[in-house]
Amino acid sequence: MNALLIGMGMVAQTHLLALRDNGAGVRLGGVLGRDLARTRAFADQAADLLGYPVDAHKDIDAATATKPDLAILITPPNARIEHAQALSAAGIPTLMEKPVERTLEQARAIVGLYHNVPLGIVFQHRTRAASQTLMKRLESGDLGEVVHVEIKVPWWRDQAYYDEPGRGSYARDGGGVMISQAIHTLDLALWLCGPVKELQAQMRSSPLHRLEAEDIATAILTFESGATGMISATTCAYPGGTESITLITTKARVHLEGDALRLDWIDGETEMLGTDQSTGGGADPMAFTHGWHQSILEDFAQAVRIGRAPLAMGQEALRVHAVIDAMTRASASGQTEKVRA
């Protein structure tokens, strides 16, 4: 399968490593960027890494004319809609980095373009071994009923991170810590525990950073299942820690931290599964393994090949956007807000 990579930002190298090592037979056929000279230089570097030629494209029409089997769209969210329109119109399955767009409404518009074309989202935390194990245990009923959920993202970013033009702005990114960092852990929690019905929230910009949007966010959640929950997310927690999800169930306390899972059963038994790994919670946002991106790529390629749904579908991403949208509204209003799924 030939892939088209659109965008050459910070996460591009991670995708190149995933393409190099993938076991699904996906090759990088071409790269599309805004500046042709820079795109050619990037394509040459990719070719050196991958061991085969990679084309450089100057516009989306030329890129789609090569009829790639799938596209990997990693531009900033404010540069998505035109690419998504062209790719969906050409019937090209698309694996898209989070977030889908800057607002819930804009994300809905993009997902709506793919009503007959596969759309996957790079929510790679779902592919972690500990996450997969926990999902299976929840689905089997072994853990009983989830009654409370704690979502924590204690990350750190220095000011240099926010000094990049547009970083942490509503115009380019759509917000701050929730839509750019905590979105992964929030998606994982929703995947494991189901949708949120309503919430209260506070979202603030701290004295530690200069940015337009929030670097601290908290929320109190009510899940549709009846479970309660909370979110604490920040990029102010120097030197940065590992994100975690803790579930209180009728049979155990379950703690998922990175790719490590601990189950403390009410009967006194303890299970520990997996190992903790760096997840990019510190000053270097790219300090994590490319293996999770490789797994999401392999899943998407296989889904396209056999006609099944990918692990993280575009429609599911709207649940995460809906929670972030409700948090933004709740922080502004000071009231409990419904999640507009």
Image (tube, rainbow, N blue to C red):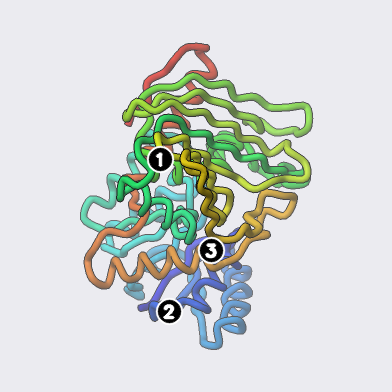
Q: Residues within 10 Å of mark 1 (few under 14, many from 20)?
A: some
The mark closer to the camera, 1 or 3, is: 1
Cα gap from disc 3 to disc 2, whole angstroms: 26 Å
Left or right placement of residue 75 versus residue 168 in this view: left
Q: Which mark is residue 16?
A: none
Decide which of tag 3 and tag 2 comes sooner along the chain.
2
In front: 125, or 211?
A: 125
Q: Which residue is mark 1?
A: 190
Identify the residue shown where x is 48% and y is 43%.
265
Q: Which residue is mark 3?
A: 33
Secondary structure found at label 3: loop
Left or right placement of residue 242 versus residue 30 in this view: right
Quadrant of the image containing the N terminus: bottom left
Q: Which mark is residue 23?
A: 2
Left or right placement of residue 327 versus residue 35 in this view: left
Secondary structure found at label 2: loop
Cα gap from disc 1 to disc 2, whole angstroms: 29 Å
Residue 136 in which image quadrant: bottom left
- Residue 74 image offset from top left, x and y in percent: 50, 57
Residue 16 in which image quadrant: bottom right
- Say above or below: 315 vs 60: above
- Residue 180 image offset from top left, x and y in percent: 57, 43
Identify the residue shown where x is 29% and y is 66%.
303
- Residue 333 image offset from top left, x and y in percent: 50, 12
Residue type at mark 2: give it.
Gly
In front: 9, or 130?
A: 130
